[in-house]
Image (spheres, grey):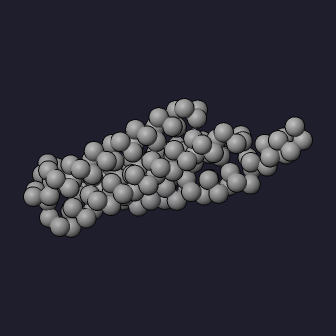
Amino acid sequence: MRKFFLRLGSGLGFVSVAIGALGAHALKSQLSENALQNFDTAVKYQFYHALAILAISVLMHFGRKKALIIASWLFLAGIGCFSGSLYLLSTKEIHGWDMAWLGPVTPLGGLLLMAGWAWVFISSYRHFERNYKDEKNG
């Protein structure tokens, strides 16, 4: 699972940089200032949480993984809902699709991201003491 989350985090980071470059260069002349700011917010949150998933892949080395796995899946779902909805909403000037139904998806994504951080916090109580004790006795 560590390798999967390492690959997932690095892939999401790569896509963040690529989408950020697209927004900074190709979309700059096609979107309003407000739409560009929303697009940039989506890129930032995707990138931050890609880094969080990478950190989780490292943390998994130190203990049992259940809470960290839950956190990673919540981060992935949060990226999809939060950043994904912002990408679509901010580019509606270009594609012209009616995306009004996505309005409630963005805050749901934010809640999923916060839940992911809560599970990282929970993991600090459940997963790391065991390995520390094992190393101390070994």
Q: Is residue 106 left or right of residue 39?
A: right
Q: Is any atom of residue 43 visible in this view?
A: yes
Q: Residue at x 10, y 56 (%)?
A: 30
Q: Residue at x 21, y 49 (%)?
A: 22
Q: Is any atom of residue 105 visible in this view?
A: no
* Residue 54: percent from left, percent from top: 51, 44
Q: Name the image quarter holding the N terminus.
A: top right
* Residue 65: percent from left, percent from top: 67, 40
Q: Residue furthest left?
A: 29
Q: Is residue 109 left or right of residue 115?
A: left
Which corner quadrant of the image does residue 82 belong to?
bottom left
Q: Is residue 61 above or below residue 75?
A: above
Q: Residue at x 39, y 56 (%)?
A: 45
Count of numbered labels shown in the rendering:
0
Q: Out of 29 and 114, give the one closest to the viewer.
A: 29
Q: Is residue 54 above or below residue 35?
A: above
* Residue 83: percent from left, percent from top: 35, 53
Q: Is residue 51 left or right of residue 105?
A: right
